[in-house]
Every structure is written in structure tokens, then in C-alpha cells.
Image (cartoon, coloured by chain):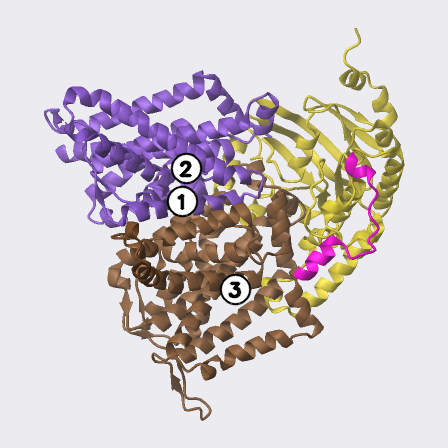
Chain colours: A purple, B yellow, C brown
Amino acid sequence: MRFFVDTLSLGITQGAVFALIALGYTLVYGIIELINFAHGDVFTIGAFIGLNLIALFGMQTWSPALLVPGLILLFAVTMALNGLLGMAIERVAYRPLRNAPRLAPLITAVGMSFFLEGVLYLVRGPNQIAYPNLFPSGSVSLGFASVGLTNLVIVAVTVVLMVGLHQFIQRTRVGRAMRATAQDRDAARLMGININRIIAITFFIGSALAAAGGIIYGFYNESISFDLGFRSGLIAFTAAVFGGIGNVVGASLGGFIIGLIIAFSTSYTSWGLQWADVIVFSILILVLVFRPTGLLGMRVPEK
Amino acid sequence: MGTVLETRGVSKRFGGLLAVNEVDLQVEEGEIFAMIGPNGAGKTTMFNMIAGLYKPTSGQILFRGKSIYPIREFWRNYTPLLAGYYAVADRVRRGLGFGPMPLALRPHAVTTLGIARTFQNIRLFSFMSVLENVMVGEHCRMHAQVYDSLLRTPRAVSEERRVQERARDLLKFVGLERYSEEYARNLPYGHQRRLEIARALASGPRLLMLDEPAAGFNPQEKVELIQLIQQIRSQGVTIFLIEHDMKVVMEISQRIVVLDYGEKIAEGPPEQVRNDPRVVEAYLGKPA
Amino acid sequence: MTARSQKPAPSSSPSVAARIRGTWSAGTRAFARGSRVPYIVLLLLLVAFPFIDGNQSHIGIAQDAGRWILLALGLNIVVGYAGLLDLGYAAFFAIGAYSYAMLASGQFNVHVPFWFLLLASAFIAALFGVILGAPTLRLRGDYLAIVTLGFGEIVPRVFRNSSKFTGGVNGIVGVDQPFIPKVFGFPGYHFLFNPVPYYYVILAVLVISILLIINLRNSRLGRAWMAIREDEVAAASTGINTVTTKLLAFALGASFSGFAGTYYSAYLFVVTPEAFSFQAVSIVVLIMIVLGGMGNITGVIVGALIIYALQSYVLVQLPGWLNSLQSSINLPFLQGVDLGSYAQDSKYLIFGIILVGIMLLRPQGLIPSAQRKVELELGTQDEAVADLRGSA
């Protein structure tokens, strides 16, 4: 039982990170139908920005009373900076190609991913870098098992971000414009929506969420490396496809499910550790082949 | 003279919108059959379903008496697993009284059967030459296999020569032989429409579906188009067209069907349709 | 309406399309007209190369470059001709390499001859291409990119994890080396570690491949690829089976990769799973064709040579150059900065910059195919048949 609960909390916590990345994929794909290959590396950069801010302000030594507002600020600033990075990438690399054949922005996205990874490699080198965990480290006893406080805080933060995103998309004017743009870009433009602005905002939100995912990843795994984004990105994309790409709720759900699949296959089987990635990528292929609309369905082309 | 194309209770739903509602059509061999109706009446949706671009939500489409979506075709066109799924679903639907599973051949298979089409907003291969555009139209009548292509076998060479010759003949037929080396996108608008017809004819259709062929034409061009359509028909090709220009429709078609809000509201020879009160109402609105 | 009012220009001078097509198929035309002289001279020079330059390592480099060219030519069929983004090209390379290594080594004590497996592995790789492509090519084009990326990650992992069959992380060592058997009085010949016979094998394979690819491009199939690239919906409605046509491009591309894989493992004598990662193969080949010019054979060859030189010569030598430069100039602010290691570490960065830069500034590549150039500049119809028909 203890083992089961451990695995469950591991899966949900990892899944939270994948879900936060997957949201970025799904938002961008929903709006401009581009698989943003660079998104995984934007996530890594978010983790590094957070690490640098922590080091800059020496946050490891802050007292608990100071730490709570400090953490909120840390998340906010990192997310904002990373969001700006996402916007810049869109402005520089994708916007000029918006009317080119679809192949062109796809190749550019792959190139952008390599560029970002290259920058990280150059600056931080090839090795694993230690990451402090600023979330509380104790555990809560449930009697039959115990759950790490870090895990609980991570899930709480993730759920808050997801609910916030959902409310933003459903309730605000910008959110409505985003949904309109996703359905029919030309019609949205005719209704006076500034498409460029909406796309930029989408990239901002996606990258900001990835940054939150990056910090959480760092806190939980306590180390990061420059090429983290490649694997995490691919897994998160799988999650987005699994839930139904273009579907925000689906991406969150997909993230948690993929996280659980990885956790249970690594914990409960002797071969899981080696084969987990193969399983996930096979899921990606199988879902795309047999149910490309994913669990919850993607937006239907209304023609 | 038999029926070339028949639709039985064909419907198409996009989300909450019922674009086409239980439409029955019969296009007879050798006639010029027109489909008219206000914008958004579901005419192009109907075309797209017949051409295999949309799958009907329900109903059946028959070409020369045979369903264009027999399960057997699915074994060839789809992965066996999917075809098996469809076969079972079809049984279940019939058993429950929902009618047969609405399936459709993929567009290329429809074209190979003998239904060719043009598009309302011209869709040529812009950066291929006029001649190549027509040669692509002959693709489904060619037999060169991969190894023929790779090794440039005598078979491929002679077929390529034959196809090119036929493409030139077709260009002559529509009056574009002078432009055969031009990029398709550099042709003037009227010529692009003609090229699209030539490309459709290249697949050797029995039924030619024209989606608003006279759109944007001046009176002179319309006269030429009518001549061209009649020439095509005299060669034994049945014509099924969507058109907004009533003069063109009334002049060339033997029978007309009228769609409004996805439903068939009238059908018959031009003079009858012209005087049908429901048609007048659909076009002009209810008299006050 | 404005388009209509302008009367068609009388095509007295050769039309734009004709002129462009002229340069596009200049290679073929040259062959057809009989002006094959430059090509034959080049070929003779390449044949004579080992006799002119006795340096074994130079020939080794040349054959290695030839292998990359072969890979690039194969991916060009997929990306350049059919317009499909294949990010898992390394998987087929790995399948080719492991097919040979498993069927011609001490691993299972099976020793199938090299010449047979060179062809067979192309078929094996093509088969895997079909297995992967058949279901996924029905989907929208950009899904293929991610599916192939996933497949490219799966295959090396499978080879690494199934150590019973593939030797795991250590790979398979002691792969058979090709030999020409004793027949008709010919004494027989073992390749051993001499690069010269390998050089001739890859040269012959390249010449044949280029001829085949030229044929392909000018055939029924080549025309169908072009049509699908420009407007998939129109192509399908015109009678092209878009799925099988794309599948053929995918399988043909894979077979080139399988071919190269077998050759590679025979030459290297060893295969290890690490040699087939995304970063080591797939992306490098993609950069080669994007840089050189998608859809143009000459461009692809030039692109392959440039990137090969960059990654196996310039990037290797650069640290040394920079360090000596640094010590000779001796600027105070550079003291203690290891420029050399920076240069060595900048491979990813340089690759990324090349890809993004080319796509933004010169999407048609250095030596473009005229058709691809206009498509990339003016855009094509990107609606997919799958969009209209739904998923199935």
C-alpha cells in the first residue's frame, strides 16, 4: 500500500510537470497549428531562469515567513521572463513564416529547439546541475502511507495554474479572442481581433506555464541539465496528443495520465526503467494512428 | 440511358449545423443537370460528399447503380483493422435500424471510378506548368509502377509520351495549347477555369462536376463556356453543375434541382423550376 | 477581377516556367542533349582519386562524406520531393546497420554476404518505413514529424535495451567485412581495413542512386509528389492516392537510409546504439538538405559536403585554431577564457542558427530547386485531406 501511494504521488507529481508543458503545446497548436518543437527547450530555460534567480537572491537561506511571498514572486518573475522569451521566439522565428508552406515553420521550430539547447550547452555545459528544493520537504502521514509535502504543494500550484488558465480562456475578453482565433483565424480578423497580438499572448502564456513547470521540475528532481527539454518535450507532446491536441483540459489530463503510466511502469516492473520512454513514444504513435482526436477530442474543423 | 449518379437521403452535419438534410438526387446519363440555391444552401457540401472529400453523416451515394462505399473497397483503401471495425459497425447500425454505415471512398478512388470535379475557388497546381497540370489529371489512368519510374523502363517512357500527347490534345480542346509551358498561376482567371476543366477531363470521367464554372465571367466568356460544356457533353460525358448565373443554368440544363437550407425544395425542367413558388420565395423572400 | 482584365502576354520569349524548369532539370537535359562531358570528367576524377592521392585517411574521409551524401539524397526524396518532414531518419539508418550487424557477425554466428544484405537491408528499412508510414500518413502532415521523431527515439532504445540480441550498450563488435568471392578465375578480395574498396562501393552506389533519383523526379511519381506538395486536396480530387504516393516517398527515403546503414556498419566493423540518435544523424541530414536546397540534387550534395566538412573538420580543428590564436594575440580580457572549449561546445548552436537562418532568410537553400523556391516564397495550399474527412 505504501509503495502504491508512493508511486501514485510520484506519477501525479511528474504528471503535473508534463501537463504544464503540454498546455503550451496545445495552446500554440490550437491557435496556429504549429508543433512548437522549441517548447521543450523553453521549459528548460524556464528552469534555468528560476535557478539563477534563486541563486541571485540567495533564496535558499530565506526564513520560512519570507519564503512564501518570495516563492510567489519567484514564480511570477520567472514566468514573465520566460513568457517574454516565448513571445520573442514567435516574433523572430515563426511570424515571418506564417504564410509559408507548413514545412517551413516546422523546420524552423526544430532549428529553434537546437539553438536554445546550444545556448544552454554553451553557458551551462553538459553536466547535471544541482537545484535547490524550496518547497517544504516534510511528509504528511495518512496512517497507511505518507505523502511528501513537496508533492502536495506541487499539485496545488499546478491545479491553481490550470484553473487560472481555464478561467482566463473562458472568462476574459482576451480568452474569448483566443478561442475565436483558434476556430477561424480569418473570421476573427474580420471581427477586429488583432491576430498577431493574440498569437503573441498565446506564446506568452504557454511559455510562462512551461517556466512554472521548469521550476517545479527543478524542485522535485533537484537537478537539471541543458538537454532536459528534448525528452520532456516529447513526453509532454504525447500528453497533449493523448488528451486531444488543441484541448486545454485534455492536455492537463493527458499530462497526469502519462505521468502515472511512467511511474507505474518504472516502479512495478523490472523492465520499466529501461522501457518507459519506449512505452510513452509508442503511446504517441498509437494514439495518433487510432484516435488522433485524443481522449477528449480536438477542435473539429468547421468547414 | 440509365442513372449515372444517385444520392439517397444524404445528410451532412457539421457540429450543430445540418448543412445537407436527406437529399435525394438522380443524375441521368448524358444530361446536363444543374443544382442551384441561395448561398449556404449546401450545394458545395453536396459536391464534396460525392467527391469523397466529406463523409456523409448518413445516406448513400450510388455511382452507376453501385454504392461508392462498398465495404470491399474499404479493405483495399483502409487498414484491415479499420475496415473490420467499419464492417462490424455497419452490421450493428443496420440491425438497429439506423441504415447503413455512411462511408465514402477516398477522393482519388471516386475520381478513378469516373467522377471528376472542379472547385469553386480554383485549385490548380500553381507552380506546375499548364501541361503538367493536365498530366497530373491523367495520373489515375497511368500504369507505371515505382520500378518503372525508378528505372525509366520502355513502358514508362512510352506511357509518358502518350500521356503528354493526350494532355496537349485536351489543352487544344479547351483552347489553351499556347500556354502549355506557362505556370498555371500566371494564366488569366478565365483560362484558369478552363485549365481546371481540362485537368478534370484528363481523368476520363463519365460524370463531370463543375462548381460554379461561370463565376466571374463576362458575357462573352459565358457564351464560350456554354459552348465548351455542350461540346464536352456531346462526347458522352454527363455534366452536373452548380451555378448562380440563372441565364447560363436555364440555357444549358435539362433538369434543375433547387436546394435551400440543405433541403431539396424543387426539381424539374428549367421552365417548371423557374415558376415554382417555393423557388421564387427562396430566392426573393416571402412576399409581404 | 484585376487578374482577368490583363490580357495574357503572348509567349514569344520563353516563358518563366519554361526558363525555370530549364535550370531545374539542367542536369537531366545535359544528359539528354549529350553534353555529359562535365559529369564524366567529374566521375573520372573521382574514380582516379585514390590513385592521385595515396593518403588512406583522405580516402577514408571521402567515403564517409559519400555515406552522408547518400543519406541526404534519401531524405531529400521525403522532405524535398514529397514535402514530408521526417525527423526519425536515423531510425532507418539504425535498422539498416543492425540488420547487417546481426545477420553478418559472430552475434548469432550467421554470415550472410555483404552484397546481398546491402540490397536486403534497403528492403527491410523500406518495410519499416511502410509499417510506420501506412497508418500515420493518413494524418495531417505535421503529425508525421512528431511520429517520426518518436520512432527515431524508440528504435535506438530498443536496440540498446534488447541486449540479448543486439549486445546492448556495447553494440555488436566484429561485423563481417565485405569480400569479393573467388569466381571465374578472379582471385577474390577481402576489404579488411583498407578504405579504398569502400570508397569505390559508395561511389558506385551514389552514381546509381543519383541516376535513379533523376528518373524518379521526372516520372509519374515525381509529378504526383509535386502536386501533393502544392495542394493535397486538389491532388486527391484529381485522382492521386495521396496516402500511397506519400508512403512511396517515405519508403524510398527509408531504403536509402537502410542502404547507408549497412554500408556504415560494414565499414566501421562495429555498431552501437549511440551512433543513431536524433542529434547525431536525423538533424544533421535535415540540415544538409535544408542548407543545400530542398528538392535539388546538386544542392543536397553541396549541402551534405558543407555540413560534413563543418562537423568533422572545422568543429574539430576550431578549438586548436582558437587556442593558438588566443595565445598569439594575448588579449588581457581573454586571459583564462577557454575559447577552444566554447568552439567545441557550439555545435548545437551552429546547427540551430543554420536551420533557423536558412528558413528565414533563404528558405530555398543555397542551390535551390526553382519550384521549391517559389513555393516557399509564395506559399501553397496547406489544407489536408484529413482535415476535411476527419480522422479515419
Name the residue carrying label 3. Answer: C301
Subunit ID for the residue under disc 3: C
Name the side, left or right, on which A129 lies relative to B117: left
A143 is higher (above) or lower (below) than C215 = above
For badge 2, the amino acid type reads: Val
Name the side, left or right, on which A204 lies relative to C28: left
Q: Is residue A178 visible?
A: yes
Discs 3, 1: same chain: no
- Which residue is depicted at the point 47% across and 47% down? C356
Give how far across and how far down residue A167 sits, in percent.
Answer: 40, 18
- Which residue is depicted at the point 68% across and 74% down? C35
Name the residue carrying label 1. Answer: A113
The crowd level at tag 1 (other Cα within 10 Å; few <14, some 14-19, many 20+) is: many
Q: Which residues are magenta?
A: C1-23
C295 is higher (above) or lower (below) than C234 = below
Q: Nearer the viewer, residue C128 or B122?
A: B122
- Which type of secondary structure does the marked residue at label 3 adopt? helix
* The quarter of the displayed image where residue C114 is located: bottom left
For badge 1, the amino acid type reads: Ser
Give how far across and how far down residue C358 sits, in percent.
Answer: 51, 50
Name the residue carrying label 2. Answer: A241
* The quarter of the displayed image where residue B60 is located: top right
- Which type of secondary structure does the marked residue at label 2 adopt? helix
| Mark 2 to mark 1 CA distance (whole Å) | 20 Å
| Mark 2 to mark 3 CA distance (whole Å) | 36 Å
For badge 3, the amino acid type reads: Ile
Q: Nearer the viewer, mark 2 or mark 1?
A: 1
Subunit ID for the residue under disc 1: A
Is C11 a magenta residue?
A: yes
Q: Is residue A244 visible?
A: no
| Mark 3 to mark 1 CA distance (whole Å) | 25 Å
